[in-house]
Amino acid sequence: MTFPTDFVFGAATAAFQIEGATAEDGRGASIWDRFCRTPGKVLHGDTANIACDHYHRLEADLDLVRELGLDAYRFSIAWPRVLPDGRTVNPRGLDFYERVVDGLLARGITPMATLYHWDLPQVLEDAGGWPARDTASAFASYADVVGRRLADRVAHWVTVNEPWCSAFVGYLEGRHAPGIRDLSASLAAAHHLLLGHGLAVPALRAAGARSIGAVVNLSDVHAASDRPANVAAAARVDGHENRWFLEPLRNAHYPDDMLAWYGQRADLAPLRSGDLATIAVPTDFLGINFYERHVVAHDSSEPIHEARKLPVPPPLTAGGCAIRPDAFRDVLVRVHRDYGAPVIYVTENGAGFADYVDPEGGVDDLERVEYFRGYLGAVEEAIAAGADVRGYFAWSLLDNFEWALGYSLRFGLVFVDFGTQRRIPKASARFYSQIARSRGQHLALTAAT
Ligand code: FCB
């Protein structure tokens, strides 16, 4: 593998998934704290009250990033630590993130900070949540508060992480917090997440931020056959998961086919067209998270999109995602070709497996090694095809709280024993570290053990 010498290798995490300390130093509750306490929402009733206890193990965890030889670390800032009641600044919340940033810089690691990785303060949900327009301006005020404290030291800023998941998994499918199932609410939520992004960018710039982008999760979507009904169903899934976010962010409009489809099923009044110029504010990069490839058939019994995702053939991750590096390459190349050749950071990519510690005390996650080998190869191919990919962040540094799946699925380069909080770098960590350290040289990669 050959990556440009200035290509950035990093790892990513998110506040709620790793920090724990949910009631410490003035932190307020988030929608995910509430969701975890609601019976039946999170597998096995898991909570993130302790998670990886990262809040108390910050320095040792940052040492891990350095020991892996990574250039950059993507973390998220918990809005309810900074503004517990949605309005009043909690300096101790900001102090923690200042320690994160300064700790990274002291170790020679570039910080990439995400402002919103799904942990909306519960008070703001009580006031209407993302379906309410005011939440977008509340987000811009939060961006301003954080930016004024940290923009001088954070190299890259992400406004919102995966607005598709926040809006549609949270307010349409109800599988994520706040667990609502309402198409109109979810479309309003998606719009206000995008608007929040558009308002946060100038707030961050005014605070001195230099590199800012949104992160979208994109999927590779194919029709089950060339039957027109299947092709149309696939176009709706693509419209829902990809174009609904790429078009407004990059081209200042919503896709016409989806506007027509949703217009017959939902109230689109909150989607004020005057907001589109705000949403499409110029940014410095587009963050892409990639996990999924879908094969879609028409099925009129499926709610809303009348589209069914067919079971995917192996190889699969334990989370049921198809292992298809070619799908990843195609998505990167598509964004480059169809959406104005943006600077791209792959802000997340990785695989969930049921890892375990072997009798010798190691974690030989060879499936994940193969996954990273394939997907990093896809990034190289996308770059060779012209895509301006500047960096890659493995999801995740640590095994962590995987949302509604609790602790059942492990994504880390580093294994976490949740009983003792012991960290054990996996075989994939050594493999990834080897790639990061040998950039610019041609490497015949071996599954490092
Ligand atoms: C993404 C999320 C991230 C993590 C991975 C597996 O959708 O952004 O927090 O849960 O999936």
Image (cartoon, rainbow, N blue to C red):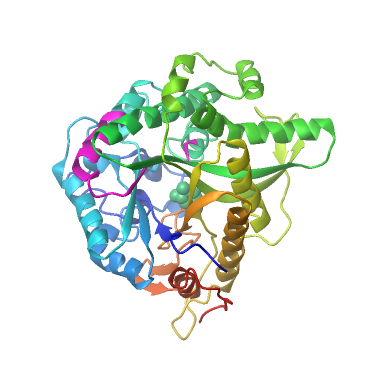
Extreme-bottom residue of the structure = 360
Question: Which stretch appears magenta?
Answer: 140-163
Where in the figure is residue 133, as x and y percent of width and height?
38, 21
Task: Compare residues 322 and 198 and report the one nearer the observer.
Answer: 198
Task: Compare residues 179 and 413 and report the one nearer the observer.
Answer: 413
Residue 408 seen in the current view = yes
Extreme-right residue of the structure = 227
Left or right: 327, with 228 as reference point: left
Q: Residue at x 50, y 59 (%)?
A: 409
Q: Is residue 144 magenta?
A: yes
Quarter of the image where one finds residue 114: top left
Where in the figure is residue 399, as x and y percent of width and height?
43, 62
Vertical comparison of 43 with 426: above or below: above
Task: Compare residues 184 and 23 and report the one nearer the observer.
Answer: 184
Left or right: 446, with 94 as reference point: right
Vertical comparison of 265 with 281: above or below: above
Where in the figure is residue 56, as x and y percent of width and height?
23, 61
Vertical comparison of 269 with 199: above or below: above
Q: Residue at x 61, y 53 (%)?
A: 382
How many marks can you see? 0
Q: Quadrant of the N terminus?
A: bottom right
Quarter of the image where one finds residue 310: top right
Extreme-left residue of the structure = 91
Q: Residue at x 55, y 34 (%)?
A: 246
Q: Residue at x 51, y 46 (%)?
A: 288
Q: Is residue 160 magenta?
A: yes
Residue 43 seen in the current view = no
Where in the figure is residue 258, as x and y percent of width and height?
63, 24
